[in-house]
Amino acid sequence: MNLKARTITAVGAGLVLTLSACGGGNDDGGAASSGELAGAELIVGSKEFTESILLGQITAVALENAGAAVEDRTGISGSATVREALETGEVDMYWDYTGTGWVNILGNTTTDVPEDLYAAVAEADAENGIAWLEPANFENTYRIAVPSSFAEENGLSTMSDAAAYIQENPDDATVCAASEFINRDDGLPGLEEAYGFEFNNVVELDLNLIYTQIGEECTFGEVFSTDARIVSNDLTVLEDDQEFFVEYQGALTLRQETLDEYPAIADIMAPISEALTDETMTELNGRIDNDGEQPRDVAEEWLESEGLLG
């Protein structure tokens, strides 16, 4: 492969693997006196990016509405860190994705994906004492995007197009990506292997900085498929025509002992998960990332508008 020596440049934040509270929620430890979860004290966590924090806030508002006292620990950096927090009891629940569960948590590959991925992940993770509630109706998978003007100018619509372009234009083989995507088998390394190319310059950025740097710091960039900043930054998402990326359906995960103690959590979350579609997540993410609204406010208003608060 006639490419320049590959370099990885770290820029910005996003490497701090510490627990952080993002505000909001009922942190006073006092449970409401009535409701299905009256007397319950629960800790809701999340990963550090917008969608995960929003899902954590939606969960916290719903559980508080059912009478629980909820401590907010949303905004934990890194999938491995939040998963460890769940396993050790530092948080009681957080939303994860089936693809992450299959590859990153359970140690499978992107080439041995079962047809019913959710069922396989839920069954396998049950042996670790972790329950996956019924998944939501949205999928937030990894994608690679470029500026729309660049895609049109160079005839790029698929990852195969991009691979061929990069082979012929190594000076443009730059990608902005977050640390986790750079190092995951179901992220950049696997993508490059599947399509037979390699970025010669990988610029490591905080997730929230990537969208505005595509076309600036980098030609290509990692994006999430339900992120509204794809539209607001006029980006074109390249089709994964060889179907490398695994399905990333969202689901609330919690320790089985927590679910056994509070089985009402599954009943409370079921209609919420059903209402969370791709379009809904993109709209709600956009209210935070593009319009500057607070995740807690968006969560409360959406739940009320959908009639999901009793």
Image (cartoon, rainbow, N blue to C red):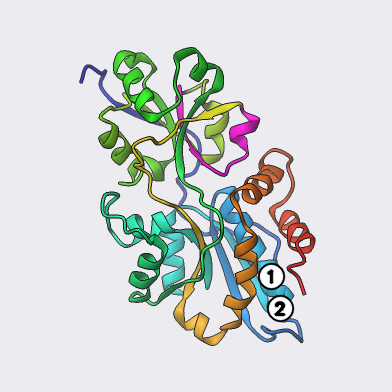
| Residue 272 horizontal side relative to residue 147, left or right | right
Report how far apart the C-alphas of labels 1 and 2 lie in the structure.
6 Å
SS at circle 1: helix
Q: Nearer the viewer, residue 189 or 158?
A: 158
Horizontal and vertical percent position of residue 78 = 45, 53
Whether residue 270 sits left or right of residue 206 in the image: it is right
Magenta highlight range: 218-233
Residue at the image point whose x is 71% and y is 78% from the top: 66
Q: Are marks 1 and 2 in contact (CB under 8 Å)?
A: yes
**Could you tell me which quadrant the C terminus lies in?**
bottom right
Circle 2 Cα neighbour tier, 10 Å, few/some/many (<14 / 14–19 / ≥20): many
Q: Position of residue 186 (x, y in %)?
A: 34, 46
**Residue 231: quadrant of the picture:** top right
At horizontal 71% and vertical 44% (from top left) the residue drawn is 287
Q: Which residue is mark 2?
A: 66
Q: Residue at 69% across / 53% down in the picture?
A: 295
- Quadrant that contains the N terminus: top left
Task: Check residue 127 for magenta coloring.
Answer: no
Residue to which mark 1 is pinned: 62
